[in-house]
Amino acid sequence: MSPNVLALLPEYILTITGVLIMLVDPLFQPERTRKPLGILAILGTLAAGLASWYQLGFGTLHAFYGTIQVDAFSVFFHLLIAAIVLVTLLSSLDYFEGHATHAGEYFALTLFGAVGMMLMTCSVELLMVFVGLEISSISTYIMAGFRKGQATASESSIKYFLLGSFATAFFLYGIALAFGATGSTRIDVISQGLATTTMPTLALLSLALIIIGIGFKVSAAPFHVWTPDVYQGAPAPVVGLMSTAPKAAAFAVLLRILFSGFPSYEPRWASLIWVIAALSMFVGNLGALMQRDVKRMLAYSSIAHAGYLLVAYTAFPADGIASACFYTAAYAAMNVGAFTVITQLSGYDEHARTIDDYAGLALRRPVLAAVLGFFLLSLIGIPFTGGFFGKFYVFSAALHSGNVWLAVIGLLNSGIACFYYLRLLAALYAKPVHHNEQAPIYAPVTVPAAIALTFTAVATLLLGIAPNRILSLAQRSANVTMHQTNSIEPTATDAISSTGTR
């Protein structure tokens, strides 16, 4: 097999599947269900995930003149993105039934978006990263406004597109300045060029612009203004996808750029990341306290979790990369699981929007209430959940690197977050607010949705009680990405790994 084909095998599979869906979709009658297309998308995603796992046995692969590098780091995020997309497709397989005839486009766009995200994680050339970013962004711009006829959906799509265009411009201009300062847009060559550049100020400016562009994608403060409105207007399964998979890809890009491209400038960009992390945690958690709409509350929650994850970037490279990878996986499992429950409860018309709409859910749908409650506890960081171990790993890495105050800020914000998560959790087991109104009628949970919920719940639990396998893959990713930092000792990873075996 050609190295170029082998290196991008998952992307080829997803692209071919998406094109096939678009070719077959017009052959269906308008009133006919599009479930077969969704099943085809699920099979394509499974095949792409298996292809990513297959790549793990080849070590490091280089393709397309060194612009693509497939290693343990990129495979980790490929598998994570494939898992998120799989859960999204399972949860939304019946979402458009009886409401829209364009469901085939949704399945194809989901796959095309995944192609862009995977391309971002394996690109070591900034222009290739930009191509992947655009492929991913265009798909999510369209999917954010997929509930046609809804004013909030149109607002969501337009606002996401306009602000995303500005952020993309910052990122692209940062790439141009990086080329001007170092003479290359390849991450490894940039790292070498920084040692001899005669324009260090230009290099710093390029890095600042790149961080701004990526900060928008991960909805870190102060680049978060789009997040609440977009999450509120977009379909629930789309929110579950866009709050996890594109963020995972963007965080992977940021890891490569900071730790592999600009390691010599770490004292400067670490201070900037420190401020962004603290600001994101406070803005996200304090903003969530004011929300009654569940999707807006989780939007602010995602801003706070971006801050938690950015704490890892201020740690030593070996600890920071591994803890960031693990936290990304833990957050993806619990957040996409929470939005899967919301998808099942709200439906296409989104009947359940506010916290009051969830009051007494345990009396009517005890299993769904219990699963949602479990995800909320994980988002808080309660022990025996993936959220707890993810925060423990990140804050331990921060303490080990001497960032005591940032770890303290993170713990303080975790305490603040308890209030709004527990407020929703208490509503699930409270009596309904309006006794005289007819209780909402929830559609039964379909088999694909049940599989998605089981998968995310089990993943969240295993990441909390038996995290060793993911920890080892995360540490392997860190070693591959930052092989030059192996001499740093001691690392917090070994101590945490031993903790996870208990």
Image (spheres, rainbow, N blue to C red):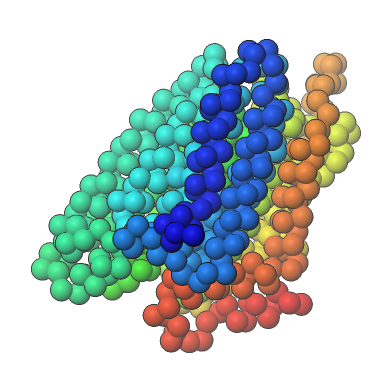
Pick out the residue farthest to the left. Answer: 198
Query: Depth check: 500 or 300 in front?
Result: 500
Residue 104 as seen in the image, left or right of residue 442: left
Which residue of the protein is positioned furthest toward the front in this rendering?
A: 1
- Quarter residue 290 falls in: top right
- Report the residue at 56% width, 19% height from top: 26
Q: Position of residue 422 (x, y in %)?
A: 72, 46
Q: Please tell me which residue lies in front, 45 or 195.
A: 45
Decide if residue 485 is in sight here: yes
Residue under the point 27% across and 41% down: 169
Residue 431 seen anywhere in this rendered image of the structure: no
Looking at the picture, how far across and down is residue 395, in whole percent?
Answer: 55, 68
Q: Quick check: 424 above or below 149?
A: below
Residue at the spot x=85%, y=41% of the render? 367
| Left or right of 175, for residue 313 | right
Q: Which residue appears at 63% of the width and 77% of the height?
A: 496
Q: Residue 441, position in %: x, y?
A: 82, 21
Percent x, y of residue 299:
55, 40
- Disc tally is 0
Q: Is residue 278 left or right of residue 352?
A: left
- Quadrant containing the C terminus is bottom right
In the image, residue 203 sits, relative to residue 93, either above or below, namely: below
